[in-house]
Amino acid sequence: MVIVKCDRLKKRFFGRAGIVKAVDDVSLEIERAEAFGLVGESGCGKTTLGKIILGVLKPDSGNVILGTKKMQVIFQSSYNSLDPKMNISDILSEGLIIKGTGQGEIKRKVEAALDLVKLPKEALKKYPHQFSGGERQRIAVGRAVLTDPEFIVCDEPVSSLDVTIQLQILNLLKEIQKRFGITYLFISHDLRVIKFMCNRLAVMRYGKVLETGPVDYIYSNPSHPYTRSLLSSHFYDIIKNDASLKL
Amino acid sequence: MQEFVKNKMAVAASLFILLILIAAILAPVAATCDPSATDSRSVLTPPSKEHILGTDRLGRDIFSRTVYGARISLFIGFIAIGMAVLIGIFIGAMAGYYGGSIDTILMRFVDTMLCFPTIFLILAVISLLGPSIFNIMIVIGATNWMGIARLVRAQVLTLKERDFVAASKVMGAKDSWIILRHLIPNAIGPVLVSATLGIGGAILVESALSFLGIGVQPPTPSWGNILMDGRSTLGVAWWLTVFPGLFILFTVLSYNILGEALRDIAEPRLKR
């Protein structure tokens, strides 16, 4: 069952260097409960596509058909995605308050989410700057899960973290997916992360999707020359030996 | 906070402001005499034990009048700037958040307001509406919000692109929620600095208006009209103008020092 269907999306930006086609005629389908990867170098339009799907940006043309209204997002920079003037309790309960959830249920859910992301109760009264990058990202994950979403856009959620913390967050995301059956759109430039997290992926360059398919298939039979060059780049050399495949 | 304590000028300024505030609030206790009680036996007496800042030509105690005057002057300063802050935040947030033609219209309005010579605008409005404490507050507030509006707009322009605003939108937040819960709390720091600096200015304007006779009307004492009272007897009774003048000077100076100290903390880049 398809949960997100993008149909011929286009989005241009007018910058100093002229018109940038951030998303150029992109069509793709994301199946329910899968983890769909979106790979590409920085500036290829991955984030723009994610924001269009979330409804934060409006496409110039084309449309997004959503099978759910319960969406959430986890951004790359936890520093930017958590309001510095709100304490953790306010940050976590924001989505529930917006939905008009009752006090008692909010309290119960916030505590459960805190437990899920393995943070102590004392964290509730603190502010984002009092946490490390990894802890902040766990808070962002907690906030995303709290509203019982069916679909989460993870936009480079581990790119600004060091490798051991990356693994913690990725395992947490996997555990959450297994437990709640959430669909992920997983945006990353890191092929190892995509391999670890996703079952299907799309490769993006200059706003266009070059190829789409199962992760295992594309990693072993890349059809597009760009995908081949991505896979043969320095980063993929590392994942070719088995030890680092497990991250 | 530590940085603030290290700044001795700022600490002294805050203590002075606090002192004046307490004196103003507790005016009935702090004043040694009734501020409007005339005494024909002690007219224009220089500072003495009985009247520590002397008396005016009606024999009223200058210290008591100054303390009660602080009430009026500070009250006008606070309320006027409070109004300016509210207007400035509203206009600035609207312009910054919605952008486009709303931004253009509001900001050209700000530019227009800034083109008026403020003091003449105030004079014109007051002579039209008549002098009263209420009108003075309104008119000072209505002519001091433009800087704050620009400040808030600039803050909102950068804040609205931050990911926590996007996250809030994804969760279904309305514009009002985003503006009130995310944008304004994050933009408020520089606004408070500007407001602190503005209070000094508002007190000065009030004093100037009262001095010109179109501000606070006698017998209600304000720092400006105590000064004006003393003007005619400046040659024989210096204490009538010097003491209230010093209060205005030190209060305005304190607010400016405090405002600058707060700015140094809020925006270290601008530090001298």
Image (cartoon, coloured by chain):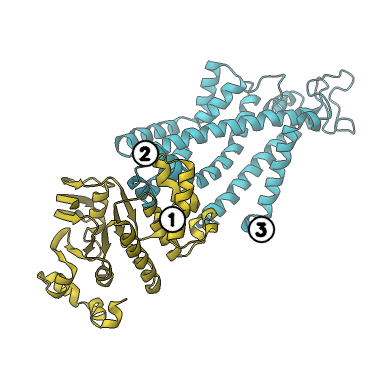
Instruction: Give yes or no for contact between labels 3 and 1 (Cβ–Cβ under 8 Å).
Output: no
Q: Is residue B247 left or right of residue A168?
A: right
Residue A23 on image: x %, y %? 18, 54
Q: Residues within 10 Å of mark 1 (few under 14, many from 20)?
A: many
Q: Residue furthest front?
A: A179
Residue on which disc 1 sits: A113
Q: Residues within 10 Å of mark 3 (few under 14, many from 20)?
A: few
Q: Is residue B133 above or below residue B96?
A: above
Q: As shown in the figure, which amino acid type bears the numbered disc 1?
A: Ala
Q: Nearer the viewer, residue A167 or B76?
A: A167
Q: Chain of mark 1?
A: A
**Callout 1 secondary element:** helix
**Callout 2 secondary element:** loop
Q: Chain of mark 2?
A: B
Q: Nearer the viewer, residue A150 or A63?
A: A150
Residue A121 on image: x %, y %? 53, 57
